Amino acid sequence: MTRILDRPIAELLPEIDGFIARGATVYIKWTCPKCGERVIADEPNVYNALGYRHTERQDGTPCDGLYLGTVFGLAVIASGASLDGGQRGHS
């Protein structure tokens, strides 16, 4: 079973800013209300308060679900020690 650790965007925005300041690339994630798939935004380092459109399912079929919620997850891409301040190996 996969645990989804989504949180309100108001809690995530300072965390997103911190990741970006340390050189990470951050993508917003959400669950599509139409098809139920987990979706990662196309554009990194941006939060769109007007909502997110899920255009295509993982199997290639169209979805067109619109998410207007305020609860999201994050996908963070970092290189080297950019997130841990140079302290590699710490969790």
Image: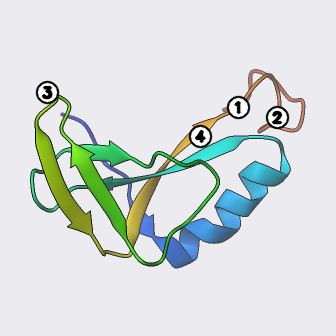
* Residue at 84% over, 45% down: 22
Q: CA distance from mark 1 to mark 3?
A: 28 Å
Closer to us: 69 or 73: 69
Which numbered dot is residue 70?
none
User: Vertical placement of 63 versus 7: above or below?
Assistant: above
**Residue pointed to by mark 3:** 59
Residue 50 in the image: state x and y as whole percent.
42, 78
In the image, taking residue 19 as reference, residue 7 lies left or right, namely left
SS state under label 1: loop
**Residue pointed to by mark 1:** 78
Whether pointer 4 and pointer 1 mark residues with C-beta atoms closer than 8 Å, the reply is: yes
Which of pointers 4 and 3 indicates the residue nearer the eye?
Answer: 3
SS state under label 4: strand
Residue 33 in the image: state x and y as whole percent.
15, 62
In the image, taking residue 85 as reference, residue 75 lies left or right, namely left
* Residue at 18% over, 56% down: 64
How many numbered callouts? 4
* Residue at 18% over, 33% down: 1
**Residue pointed to by mark 2:** 82
Q: CA distance from mark 4 to mark 3?
A: 24 Å
User: Vertical placement of 18 versus 58: above or below?
Assistant: below
**Residue pointed to by mark 4:** 76
SS state under label 3: loop
Q: Amino acid at mark 4?
A: Val
Whether pointer 1 and pointer 2 mark residues with C-beta atoms closer than 8 Å, the reply is: yes
